[in-house]
């Protein structure tokens, strides 16, 4: 674990991409001595992880924020990292950011900001995926408070020259107070992409609402909504959310996240995995290492597949209330017939108020996977976490 760079007073990793076992990028953010949140990018060269300089468009003054959430590398000399930023003097306005790696340096590339049409703009990119160096998608959400809708889906497309905004459906946007947000995008070809996330649908009157899964499909011409199960139900306080998607072909995709209840005590969160068979999405059973009783805390954050019979889903489980409880890493493996729990280290510790959580995973080969995230010991500062799979076991390093 000492081999993991940990810049600043706190740090966390949110995304990873690999072009080979000797070429990976992990991105996230860290807090500087000045009190600014800055972009971070770590590179794996086959021997060690090292911190590589990145621009932080929010600036370096106290209160400024630049955070990277996702990264995609179609080629070793062409990577995109996306996220959001705000300046120290305007903490209520978040803007999109997209950084490009040309093999030598990371540079900021202009992006549209659809939320700028409203006061207190909020634009945020969370996931990015490239079919080629001249064909990439970045997804997230943007705020549009002027019409009573909190957030709407956002998708930007890179055509090799510039990023442009592409129209997206918004399943929840027809109702006041609705929310639509995308967390990930994956493509098997230029004419076949999936974007997944969550939308809020008000239920009845008052504060009653439900969080529902959303899966949107790109057919090469337009994005459209696809029907998905909602294992947590669709009534008041139901919770369903998809965090990531992975595909091995146009007829085989996985979308993962969690489901359960919110606005009730205790809140319950269970792992969910949906599978696309080329015709429809259906729920597939998953283990829940924290159990399924009321108050259980299980969540899957990212998924990747090296073949139809080998996929990994990572996240965390457990609960922390105040200084009590522990939250630890979880890794599930799909062997073609079922999902099973695979043991992982927990660098944050296993005592009260210790926390370890995995946020992203990629496998440059079946016998080499990297999972990244964040750890905290005894409620202290968040720190970068990196785990490696060698084909037999997970280790910290």
Image: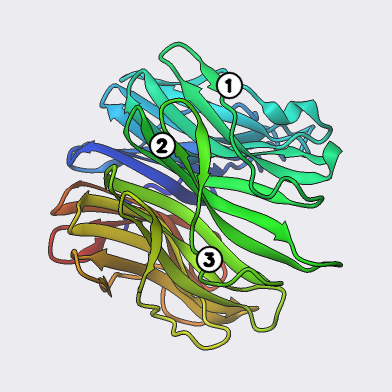
Which residue is nearer to you in this view: 7 or 332?
332
Disc 1 crowd, CA 10 A, few/some/many (<14, 14-19, 20+): some
- Measured in 3D between alpha carbons, the distance from the residue under mark 3 to the one under mark 1, in whole angstroms, is 33 Å
Task: Determine which residue is flagged by label 1.
Answer: 111
Residue 17 image offset from top left, x and y in percent: 32, 40
- Measured in 3D between alpha carbons, the distance from the residue under mark 3 to the one under mark 2, in whole angstroms, is 28 Å
Q: Quadrant of residue 236?
A: bottom right
- Earlier along the polypeptide chain: callout 3 or callout 2? 2
Image point (39%, 50%), residue name: 245
The vertical placement of 105 against 36, above or below, is: above
- Earlier along the polypeptide chain: callout 1 or callout 2? 2
In this rendering, which labeled residue sits more in front, label 3 or label 1? 3
Residue that extends furthest to the front in the rendered view of this protein: 279
Q: What numbered label is drawn on residue 71? A: 2
Task: Name the image quarter holding the N terminus.
Answer: bottom left
Image point (32%, 66%), residue name: 331
Residue 53 visible at all: no
The vertical placement of 258 against 138, above or below, is: below
- Measured in 3D between alpha carbons, the distance from the residue under mark 1 to the one under mark 2, in whole angstroms, is 16 Å
The vertical placement of 351 against 193, above or below, is: below
Task: Name the image quarter holding the C terminus.
Answer: bottom left
Which residue is nearer to you in this view: 164 or 73?
164
Q: SS for tag 2? A: strand
The vertical placement of 260 against 147, above or below, is: below
């Amino acid at each position: 674990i000492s081999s993991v760079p940990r810049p600043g007073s706190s740090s966390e990793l949110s995304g990873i991409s690999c072009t080979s076992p000797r070429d990976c990028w992990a991105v996230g953010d860290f807090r500087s001595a000045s009190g600014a949140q800055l972009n971070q990018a770590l590179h794996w060269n086959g021997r060690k992880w090292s911190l590589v300089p990145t621009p932080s468009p929010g600036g370096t003054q106290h209160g400024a924020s630049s955070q990277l959430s996702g990264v995609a590398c179609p080629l070793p000399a062409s990577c995109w990292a996306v996220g959001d930023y705000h300046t120290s003097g305007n903490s209520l306005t978040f803007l999109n950011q997209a950084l490009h790696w040309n093999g030598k340096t990371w540079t900021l590339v202009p992006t549209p900001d659809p939320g700028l049409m409203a006061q207190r703009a909020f634009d945020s990119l969370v996931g990015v995926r490239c079919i080629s160096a001249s064909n990439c998608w970045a997804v997230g959400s943007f705020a549009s408070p002027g019409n009573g809708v909190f957030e709407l889906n956002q998708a930007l497309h890179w055509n090799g020259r510039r990023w442009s905004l592409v129209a997206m459906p918004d399943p929840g946007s027809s109702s006041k107070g609705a929310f639509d947000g995308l967390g990930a995008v994956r493509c098997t070809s230029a004419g076949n992409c999936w974007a997944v996330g969550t939308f809020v649908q008000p239920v009845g009157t008052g504060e009653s609402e439900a969080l529902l899964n959303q899966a949107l499909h790109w057919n090469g011409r337009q994005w459209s909504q696809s029907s998905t199960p909602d294992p947590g139900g669709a009534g008041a306080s139901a919770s369903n959310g998809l965090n990531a998607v992975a595909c091995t072909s146009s007829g085989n995709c996985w979308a993962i996240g969690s489901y359960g209840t919110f606005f009730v005590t205790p809140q319950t969160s269970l792992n969910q995995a949906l599978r696309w068979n080329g015709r429809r999405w259906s729920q597939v059973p998953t283990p829940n290492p924290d159990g399924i009783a009321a108050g259980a805390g299980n969540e899957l954050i990212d998924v990747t597949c090296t073949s139809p019979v080998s996929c990994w889903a990572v996240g965390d489980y457990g609960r922390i209330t105040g200084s009590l409880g522990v939250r630890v890493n979880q890794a599930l493996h799909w062997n073609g017939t079922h999902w099973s729990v695979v043991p992982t280290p927990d660098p944050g510790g296993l005592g009260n108020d210790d926390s370890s959580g995995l946020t992203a995973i990629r496998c440059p080969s079946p016998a080499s996977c990297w999972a990244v995230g964040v750890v905290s010991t005894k409620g202290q500062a968040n720190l970068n976490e990196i785990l490696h799979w060698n084909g037999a076991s997970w280790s910290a390093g």
